[in-house]
Image (cartoon, coloured by chain):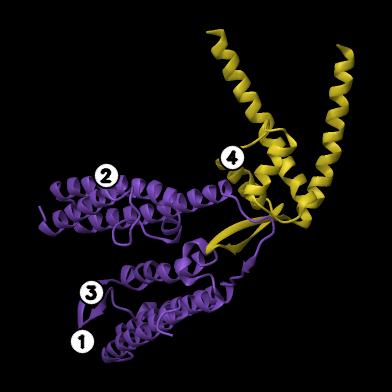
Chain colours: A purple, B yellow
Amino acid sequence: MNRIEVFIAVGLLMAGLLTLTFRNRRQFLIGFRIGYTYQSERAWKKTNTFAGVFMVVLSLFLLLLAFMEVPINGFVIVMIAGTFIMTVAGTLIAKRTYEEEDISTEAPKRPGELIRIDIKPYLLIQLSALALYFILLAVLWNRLPERIAIHFNAGGNPDNFAHKSLGAVLLPLIVQTIPVAMTAMLKEPGFAPQLKFSERGWRAFAEFMTAFSLLLTMVFATTVLYNAGFISGRWISYFAWLILVVTGVMIYRLLRARGYGS
Amino acid sequence: MFGDAKDKALKKLRKDMRSGLYSFLVLTILEREGELHGYAIRKKLEEFSDGRLVPSEGALYDILKSLKKYKLVDNFWAEVGGRPRKYYRLTELGREVLAELKGEIGEIMLILKRMEGLE
């Protein structure tokens, strides 16, 4: 029995129980917290009840896998798939509940201030960069060893390895899903009410996600170039620092766009 | 026992009949009124039917979602009191489809009248 797997499963069980405990009280620390659940008591209750039960069931299943000593890869796949299903289903439940509540609440006959959000250019940039990465990967595929370096220490020396189909194909796809999905969700204003529905707010968020996505793509491309023997590992460290700096600047811009720090 | 069967059959047939009717009525209301919030659409249905044809919030949500999927209505968001509210309007395709449906509804009404006459 692997202690790390048991620790993860028990941690998830605790998270699930805490989510269930706070499912009837909207607050900002524990629970399924997205725009819809922040804005609607009904969406909060329904989504957090679902998420809490789902996490408890998933954690018990993971605990069972840990006791059965299932290989770590299988454990991680079940954990990631479960988390993904919970996130997508939870978001859909929250969105539906919010919109049903919206229908039941009186609204002015004529719309007031329209919310206009255009995320297409941002998605296009992110997906184009990802496509360019895969072109580079296809060109260099035969030059890559079967096991490639996927993680580097501060000195730029590799300290973690994986099969190239996992490290160069699957990992970038999974990681890039986050900025792309976060940008795509912006078109639903209920998803991010903290941005105050202002053009300045949603643009700052879309630019943040686009910059983040481009930097991630560059890191993955640099990793491929390193493994193909074109550049040294120090470049990966430079990009890691660049990501930290750009993320800091983008978060500052986002906070200003929300109305803080101005 | 038979009461149960009657209720079941009525429930099923009502559901079948109303699902199409609701879509038609929502399109008609949007054609008459222009841009409307889901709440107002529901209120209009209540008004026109004297409270007899009022879909639940969930049912109206599904109807509007389905009409949007077929590009018959379009939605947009507006900020009201710090909350995003969803408004709907008829698309050009929705207008064309509604015109066709109106013709068919007219025919159905004619058939129903003829059948009444036969009784």
Query: Disc 2 marks which residue?
Result: A57
The picture places residue A20, in percent across and down from the top left corner, at 28, 47
Residue A161 marker: 3
Residue A25 in the image: above or below residue B101? below
Q: How many angstroms separate mark 3 from mark 4 (CA)?
A: 52 Å
Q: How many angstroms separate mark 4 from mark 2 (CA)?
A: 30 Å
Residue B59 marker: 4
Q: How many angstroms separate mark 3 from mark 1 (CA)?
A: 16 Å
The amino acid at mark 2 is: Val
Q: Are tags 2 and 3 found on a single chain?
A: yes
What quarter of the picture does the C terminus of chain A occupy? bottom left
Q: How many angstroms separate mark 1 from mark 4 (CA)?
A: 56 Å
Residue A154 marker: 1
Q: Residue at x 90, y 16 (%)?
A: B117
Mark sitting earlier along the chain (2/3): 2
The amino acid at mark 3 is: Phe
Front of the two marks 3 and 1: 1
The picture places residue A188, in percent across and down from the top left corner, at 53, 62
